[in-house]
Image (tube, rainbow, N blue to C red):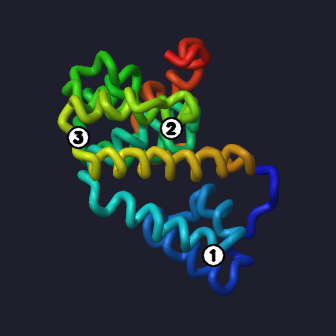
């Protein structure tokens, strides 16, 4: 961590309340929470924003978009956290395949297109054109659903890049078996990623 965070025993006021929520949910204060709690107003705004974005979306769709965006950014933080969150929505064997390469994991073409869109947005959004959006339309996504996909991927960019820039520790997610953990992290080291596969 580049910037020191507040230890739980030293937290007070709003920061202590933020920490209490993590302790209630996980039994500890997650590294990303400690980073974001350095600016409590931004933390609260983030919680409201991500709730507004994720709330209307199908949960499985939201997690697939998030995993793809985290792949494009190269974020181990979000790949691990949302790999764990995806376990309640996706069979572990299939999730391992998705984590390794969603293009060959037996997903419907609409899911592959959606994840490719989120990954490209996260790698190089300035290269995107109307053709990228048209691919999603051709797969049956409505304009409202396309906006949801964009917002979910863009929000992941905000959080992941914040954690990376501040050197937040990676929370080695409890409950992930070694095979799934490896599947989530290995593509971040894949040289094909550098070529913008």
Residue 114 on image: x %, y %: 32, 34
Q: Closer to the camera, 149 or 163?
A: 149
Residue wearing tag 3: 141
Crowding around mark 1 (Cα neighbors within 10 Å: few <14, some 14 to 19, many 20+) is: few
Residue wearing tag 2: 70
Q: Earlier in the sequence, mark 2 or mark 3?
A: 2
Front position among marks 2 and 3: 3
Q: Secondary structure at mark 3?
A: loop
Q: Is residue 42 above or below residue 159?
A: below
Q: Residue furthest front?
A: 130
Mark 2 to mark 1 CA distance (whole Å): 24 Å
Q: Earlier in the sequence, mark 2 or mark 1?
A: 1
Q: Is residue 94 above or below residue 75?
A: above
Name the residue: 40% across, 32% down.
Answer: 130
Q: Earlier in the sequence, mark 3 or mark 1?
A: 1
Residue 122 on image: x %, y %: 53, 36
Crowding around mark 2 (Cα neighbors within 10 Å: few <14, some 14 to 19, many 20+) is: many
Q: Secondary structure at mark 1?
A: helix
Crowding around mark 3 (Cα neighbors within 10 Å: few <14, some 14 to 19, many 20+) is: some
In the picture, measured across the screen, residue 57 lies left or right of residue 33, that is left
Residue wearing tag 1: 41
Name the residue: 36% across, 50% down.
Answer: 147
Question: How many numbered marks does the figure carry?
Answer: 3
Q: Is residue 80 above or below residue 22?
A: above
Front position among marks 3 and 1: 3
Mark 2 to mark 3 CA distance (whole Å): 22 Å
Q: Are marks 2 and 1 in contact (CB under 8 Å)?
A: no
Q: Secondary structure at mark 2?
A: helix
Name the residue: 42% across, 43% down.
Answer: 66
Q: Which mark is residue 176?
A: none
Name the residue: 36% across, 45% down.
Answer: 149
Mark 3 to mark 1 CA distance (whole Å): 34 Å
């Amino acid at each position: 961590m580049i910037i020191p965070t507040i230890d739980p025993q030293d937290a007070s006021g709003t920061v202590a309340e933020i920490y209490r929520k993590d302790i209630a949910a996980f039994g500890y204060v997650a590294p990303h929470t400690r980073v974001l709690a350095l600016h409590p107003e931004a933390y609260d705004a983030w919680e409201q924003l991500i709730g507004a974005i994720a709330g209307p979306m199908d949960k499985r769709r939201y997690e697939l978009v998030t995993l793809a965006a985290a792949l494009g950014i190269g974020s181990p933080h979000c790949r691990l956290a949302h790999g764990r969150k995806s376990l309640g929505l996706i069979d572990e064997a299939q999730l391992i395949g998705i984590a390794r390469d969603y293009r060959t994991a037996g997903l419907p073409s609409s899911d592959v297109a959606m994840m490719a869109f989120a990954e490209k947005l996260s790698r190089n959004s300035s290269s995107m054109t109307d053709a990228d959006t048209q691919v999603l339309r051709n797969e049956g996504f409505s304009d409202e659903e396309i906006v949801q996909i964009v917002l979910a991927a863009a929000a992941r960019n905000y959080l992941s890049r914040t954690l990376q820039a501040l050197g937040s520790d990676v929370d080695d997610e409890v409950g992930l078996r070694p095979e799934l953990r490896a599947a989530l992290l290995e593509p971040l080291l894949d040289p094909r990623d550098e070529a913008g596969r």
